[in-house]
Image: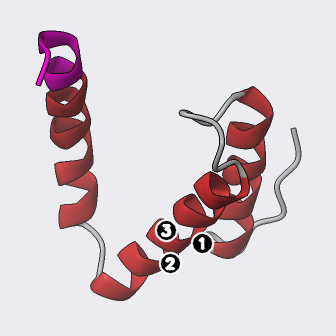
Amino acid sequence: MDKPKKERLAKAVNAILPIVAELTESEWCRIKGLVDFAYTSKAAKVTLDGPDMEALKRRLHTEILGESFSK
């Protein structure tokens, strides 16, 4: 694994561990499902772009937090 990739993944692991520690398995599965759906809908892309991230943000707020999300 090249150094930039390893550093990026280490940063992601360090960011996500405190979050996962606060969630139940059910909550994690809901969030993971929404993220998986966002990636699946853009399978040809390597990463999610601005509009995709905004759509994911709205869905997370709506489905996880039960909020109506507005820009």
Q: Which residue is mark 1?
A: 64
Mark 3 lies on residue: 31
Q: Secondary structure at mark 2?
A: helix
Tag 3: amino acid: Ile
Point out which mark residue 23 bears. none
- Where residue 40 sits, quadrant-wise, is bottom right
Q: Amino acid at mark 2?
A: Arg
N-terminal-most mark, 1 or 3: 3
In the displayed structure, 38 sits above or below 71; it is below
Left or right: residue 14 versus residue 54 is left
Look at the image and say whether residue 4 sits in the magenta stretch. Answer: yes
Residues at discs 1 and 2 in contact (Cβ within 8 Å): yes
Extreme residue toward the front, this view: 44
Q: Is residue 23 magenta?
A: no
Principal SS element in the magenta part?
Answer: helix
For the N terminus, which image quadrant? top left
Quadrant of residue 29 within the rendered picture:
bottom left
Asked whether, in this view, residue 49 is left or right of residue 55, the answer is left
Inspect the image, locate mark 1, and give the three-letter code of the amino acid beneath it. Ile
Q: Nearer the viewer, mark 1 or mark 3?
A: 3
Tell me the element at label 1: loop
Determine whether label 1 and label 3 are within 8 Å by CB: yes
Do tag 3 and tag 2 residues touch (Cβ < 8 Å)? yes
Query: In the rendering, which numbered label is found on residue 30?
Result: 2
Write the residue at 25% across / 23% down: 8
The span picked out in magenta is: 1-7
Q: Is residue 42 left or right of residue 21?
A: right
- The residue depicted at 87 percent of the width and 38 percent of the height is 71
Place of residue 25 in the rendered image (x, y in percent of width and height, measured from the top left): 29, 84
